Image (tube, helix red, strand yellow):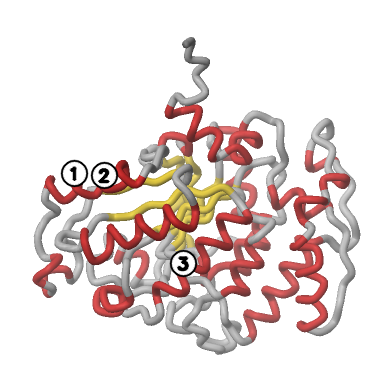
Amino acid sequence: MKDNGENHPENLIKLALSHYFNILEGEGLSYFYKSSLIPVKDKKFLYDLWEEHEQVRKDFSLNDEFTNLKIPPWKQVKPSFSYMDLKISIAKKLFDECIFCERRCGINRNDESGFCGVKKSKIASEFLHMGEEAPLIPSHTIFLTGCTFKCVYCQNMDISQHPDQGFLYTEDKLAKFIDDRKLEGSRNVNFVGGDPNPHILYILKTISLIRENIPVIWNSNFYASQEAMYLLDGVVDLYLSDFKYGNDECAMRLSGISNYWNVVTRNHKIAFESGDMIIRHLLLPGHVECCTFPILDWIYENLGKGVVLNIMDQYRPLYRAFNHNDISGFLQRQEYVEAVDYARKLGFVNLI
C-alpha cells in the first residue's frame, strides 16, 4: 500500500499545530488580530466586563465573519471597542488587586510588587532564538524578569530571581521590535522568563500594537489563575508549557509551590481547548517514577496521544540544587531512555 505521507512525523506534528502553521502559511489570522476585530460592549464594572468577556470567549471560534485574509491585518477596520480592548480593560482592573497567578497576592501592582517581585515589566533580552523546538525556530524570544516559582535548580535564576534587572521598554517600542524581528525572519513571538504571567497586562498592551500577523507563544510554568488563562484565550496561538512535577510534594520542596497539580492540570486543559500546544517536561534525576510517569499518564488520558511532547534531558544541577541530594547530580542516560520508552508505550506519536 502506497504511503501518502500523512503519517510522517513532520506531518503529524503539523496537524497537531494546524492553527500555528496556518498563520505561518498565510492561511489564518493570529488570534490577537481576530480579537481586535470583534466588536464588544464597553462596561464600567469588573463583573459586567467579565460577563461580556465570557459571552464572547465561548463563541470565539464562531466570529470568523469579522476577518478577511485578503486584507492586511493593519488595514482592516477595527471597532471602537474590541474583544482585545476588553481583555486589556479587565487586566487593568486585576492589576489593582493582582490575581494573575494562583498565589493571588491581591496587592496593587501599581504601587508594589507581589511574590513574583514584578512591579514594572522589564526585558532581560530579546533575540532570534535558534534553540527552541524545530517548528518554532527562528523564534523571537522575549525574556521577562521575575517569576512565580522559586525553583532551587533554576537555570535562569539571574532573570527569574532578579526582577529589578533588565530594560524598560514602552509597549509601542516592544511591538515595533516584534514587527521588525518578523521582517528579519522570526516565525513567532515567544514570551518567556522567568515567567510571563506577572506581565500579562504589559504583554496584552504590547500585542494589541503589533502590525504583523504573527503567532503568539506563551512559554510558561502554567501556574496562572483561571482568570488569567481566560484572558489569554483568544490571544495566544500556541502554548509552550513547562510541566514540571507529578505531585504536590515535589513541587513544594523544589519550587515552593502549593496545590501545583490541580492548578497546572486545570490550565493545561484550558490551554489545550483554546490554542495549539507543545508540552515540555524537563527530566529531574531520581524523579522519573514520582514525576515523569504520572505526568505522561495524565497527558495521555486527558489530552490524547497526538499532543506534541518534548521530554528534555538537559538538566544541570545549578543554583541551589547542590543543597538537595536527589537533584544534586546529573541525569542518568537510563532515566531518559525509561521516560521516552514509557511515552512510546503509552502511544504518544508526536515526541520531539
Q: Which residue is mark 1?
A: 337
Q: Residue at x 68, y 62 (%)?
A: 205
| Camera sees residue 10 | yes
Q: Is residue 323 rendered to the left or right of residue 225?
A: left
N-term mark: 3 or 1:
3
Seen in the picture, residue 5 relative to 93 is either above or below; the reply is above
- Secondary structure category for the residue under label 2: helix
Count residues near mark 3 (Cα–Cα under 10 Å), then give few for <14, some for 14-19, many for 20+: some
Q: Is residue 300 rendered to the left or right of residue 203?
A: left
Q: Amino acid at mark 3?
A: Thr
Q: CA distance from mark 2 to mark 1?
A: 5 Å
Disc assigned to residue 340: 2
Q: Amino acid at mark 2?
A: Val
The C terminus lies in which quarter of the figure? top left
Q: CA distance from mark 2 to mark 3?
A: 21 Å
Q: CA distance from mark 3 to mark 1?
A: 25 Å
Taking depth in this image into account, of 13 and 144 the one nearest to the observer is 13
Q: Which residue is mark 3?
A: 265
